[in-house]
């Protein structure tokens, strides 16, 4: 079966995380993604993300770039840029996270490329949106976490600003960019006209934080300080059991009352601090303390069985090491073993979402640098002689398929 984006071609001039996450999402839904990399080392993530069996093929790169084709071409040379523009004229979507001024210098900005292909969806993922004083600044995930208030939520919770220990801004904004590309493709179906999309990381993450935490400060004058104290509570964390941890969330009255019954404290159902949602919100600290100190007498498995029978939302606690072996992830096909043609046995991460009309088949493993260059250029109409000339001049670098 084909995915919903079957037949959509994407030219991916992005690197590291936010852009590759966007194009990975498109690829998962059946799009053909052509990843343009700069020789001699390609995407920075090939060397930035740690150990692999061979150079440029670490686990993070494999996970973010499976299913894509790689062409390694020197865009600093006129022949390389001419080849890129030939490619751009054959695709539906162009994605880049190069800064806007660099896009303009290279001639890959929306104005230049849409002049060649008016139906093109041009998606530019930036650190900060145009029109503001931060426009054009360089940005990585931690820069955005700090500027947008993500790190500030930790300060509000524990007194110390910290970064979320995964690239939450890159992943979130990459998926938002993929979503917006889907919207633009839908509008193109109705109008026949392409689109230029600007996706700023700072504004998107700031919107998330304000939607979550502006709260009483949404009003003028403010009704109170910003911050949802339940979400910010330092006691909002996995709860210790006799042999590990369990994760619960008991928000409704029925769930909270069932939890009190489960821990052998039925009298708390009538306690004026905990009987109703509004009262528990006012007494979050006490409520969370009861939760955190009540599960030490039983094992995690025992509590999960009790909570399941009593309809209290709960789950196992996974570590980074245990997550790939989670039985649910294995059962639904999210995690499986796979043989990479050059890297050997690897863990493959499947698509988490499903369409009743059919999903794309599992995508092939991530490519070696430049593995598909000649084939991609031939599909764009370059002759064998054209491709040989690019090889000879050092414009096209080809790797092991």
Image (cartoon, rainbow, N blue to C red):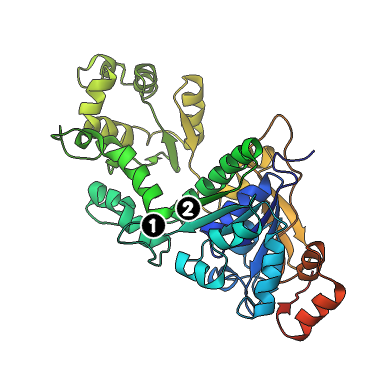
Pointers 1 and 2 in contact (C-beta within 8 Å): yes
- Left or right, 86 with respect to 243, comes to right
Where is residue 19 shown, x and y percent of the image? 55, 58
**Label of residue 198 in the image:** 2
- Left or right, 8 with respect to 231, comes to right
* Of 357 and 350, the residue lying toward us: 357
Instruction: Specify the farthest residue to the bottom.
Output: 393
Q: In which quarter of the image is residue 353?
A: top right
Where is residue 184 shown, x and y percent of the image? 58, 43
* Residue 330 visible in image: yes
Residue at image mark 1: 130
Secondary structure of the residue carrying numbered label 1: loop
319 versus 109 height, above or below: above
* Of 302 and 138, the residue lying toward us: 138
Q: Which residue is drawn at 53% across and 44% down?
A: 180
Neighbor class of circle 1 (other Cα within 10 Å; few <14, some 14-19, many 20+) is some
Instruction: Specify the farthest residue to the right.
Output: 384
Instruction: Specify the farthest residue to the top.
Output: 270
- Left or right, 150 with respect to 378, comes to left
Neighbor class of circle 2 (other Cα within 10 Å; few <14, some 14-19, many 20+) is some
* Of 244 and 23, the residue lying toward us: 23
Q: Which residue is drawn at 50% across and 20% down?
A: 309
* Of 178 and 287, the residue lying toward us: 178
112 versus 215 height, above or below: below
Q: Quadrant of residue 42?
A: bottom right
* Residue 369 visible in image: no
Where is residue 366 shown, x and y percent of the image? 70, 61
Q: Residue at x 33, y 52 (%)?
A: 148
């Amino acid at each position: 079966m084909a995915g919903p984006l079957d037949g959509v071609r994407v030219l991916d001039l992005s690197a590291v995380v936010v852009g590759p996450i966007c194009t990975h999402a498109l690829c998962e839904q059946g799009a053909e993604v052509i990843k343009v990399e700069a020789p001699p080392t390609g995407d920075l993530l090939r060397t930035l993300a740690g150990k692999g069996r061979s150079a440029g093929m670490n686990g993070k790169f494999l996970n973010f770039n499976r299913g894509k084709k790689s062409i390694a071409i020197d865009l600093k040379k006129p022949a390389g840029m001419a080849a890129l523009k030939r490619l751009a004229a054959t695709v539906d979507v162009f994605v880049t996270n190069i800064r806007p001024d660099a896009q303009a210098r290279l001639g890959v900005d929306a104005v230049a490329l849409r002049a060649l292909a008016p139906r093109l969806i041009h998606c530019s993922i930036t650190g900060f949106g145009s029109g503001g004083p931060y426009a054009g600044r360089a940005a990585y995930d931690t820069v955005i976490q700090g500027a947008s208030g993500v790190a500030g939520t930790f300060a509000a919770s524990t007194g110390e600003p910290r970064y979320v220990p995964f690239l939450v801004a890159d992943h979130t904004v990459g998926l938002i960019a993929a979503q917006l590309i889907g919207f633009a493709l839908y509008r193109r179906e109705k109008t026949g006209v392409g689109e230029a999309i600007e996706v700023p990381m700072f504004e998107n993450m700031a919107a998330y934080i304000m939607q979550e935490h502006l709260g009483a400060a949404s009003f003028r004058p403010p009704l109170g300080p910003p911050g949802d104290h339940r979400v910010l509570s330092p006691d909002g964390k996995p709860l210790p059991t006799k042999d590990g941890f369990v994760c619960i969330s008991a928000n409704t009255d029925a769930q909270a009352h069932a939890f009190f019954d489960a821990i052998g404290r039925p009298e708390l159902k009538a306690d004026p601090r905990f009987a109703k949602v509004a009262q528990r919100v006012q007494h979050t600290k006490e409520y969370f303390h009861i939760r955190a100190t009540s599960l030490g007498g039983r094992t995690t498995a025992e509590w999960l069985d009790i909570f399941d029978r009593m309809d209290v939302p709960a789950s196992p606690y996974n570590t980074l090491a245990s997550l790939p072996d989670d039985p649910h992830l294995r059962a639904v096909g999210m995690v499986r073993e796979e043989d990479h043609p050059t890297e050997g046995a690897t863990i493959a991460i499947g698509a988490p979402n499903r369409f009743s009309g059919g999903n794309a088949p599992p995508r092939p493993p991530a490519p070696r640098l430049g593995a598909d260059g000649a084939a991609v250029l031939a599909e764009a109409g370059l002759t064998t002689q054209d491709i040989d000339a690019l090889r000879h001049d050092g414009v096209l670098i080809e790797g092991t398929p």
